[in-house]
Image: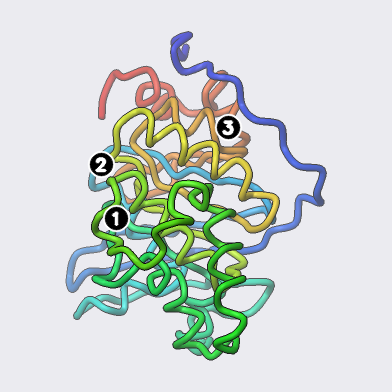
Amino acid sequence: MPSPETETKVPAVPNVPNVPKMRASHVHFHYGSFKALHDVSLEFPANQVTALIGPSGCGKSTFLRSLNRIHETLHGTKIEGEITLDGEDVLKMDVTSLRRRVGMVFQRPNPFPKSIFENVAYGVRVNGLASKAELPNIVEKSLRRAALWDEVRDKLNDSAHALSGGQQQRLCIARGLAVDPEVLLLDEPCSALDPIATAKIEDLLVGLREQCTIVIVTHNMQQAARVADNTGFFLLGRLIEHDRTDVIFKNPARKETEDYITGRFG
């Protein structure tokens, strides 16, 4: 059974109804002739953190990117099945509106070559969500939500590229939060960060679930155990098992899941 190292205490779940914010039903995904996802169905409860785990190439990042149709930036992709956001068909929504409601933070920090202030304000400006006079308050609020305000409040006009890697990743989270997304997708957001920066991101995610629904792809078993309320295990393009995080790590139903989280493969 799972080793003691993975039995990290799972954070308490907020006192909110267990209502799916997003739902994927029988999703199949193709890159040209290659089928990357096979019949994946998964629900994401509102105001909870769901972690997607599995070995490299198992389809978890592909699935994550399908949730706000980032895959459409790649030529030759095809998706089948249904994905809904509050019951609305994601595949039929206006994509700009969808990506405002379902934000994305990528594996490596990707701040724009602009000031810290302009990075956070960018999405609000292009979507016409606030007046110029309102922007300073929105930027401050977003940086506070991303636990970065105290570190950058006196250098908002400095280049975002002058920040450390961990600070840049929190800036990207602040940029995503500025448009008040309902769902935040994170694709291995800590893989390029040191342990101190990783801990700050993890603390941030636990707090943010009170404000939005979070889905995170991670290779770090301990990280999934620390931050996620629910966990789904992917293997060879299929969702093998999904359940409460404590169940997945302490009493998985499938042998493939147990073998992966105990390090027998992957």
Element marked by disc 2: loop
Question: Between tags 2 and 3, which lies in front?
Answer: 2
Q: Is residue 197 above or below residue 149?
A: above
Tell me where residue 60 appears, x and y as whole percent.
Answer: 36, 51
Residue annotated with mark 1: 109
Tell me what residue is drawn at x 68 percent, y 52 percent: 47
Tell me where residue 162 appears, x and y as whole percent.
Answer: 25, 55
Tell me where residue 26 appears, x and y as whole percent.
Answer: 49, 64
Q: Amino acid at mark 3?
A: Thr
Asked whether disc 2 touches disc 1, contact meaning CB atoms under 8 Å apart, the reply is yes
Which of marks 1 and 2 precedes in the sequence? 1
Element marked by disc 1: loop
Residue annotated with mark 3: 245
Say left or right for 169 vs 252: left
Q: Amino acid at mark 1?
A: Pro
Residue annotated with mark 2: 192
Q: Quadrant of residue 193?
A: top left
Element marked by disc 3: helix
Q: Is residue 53 above or below residue 212?
A: above
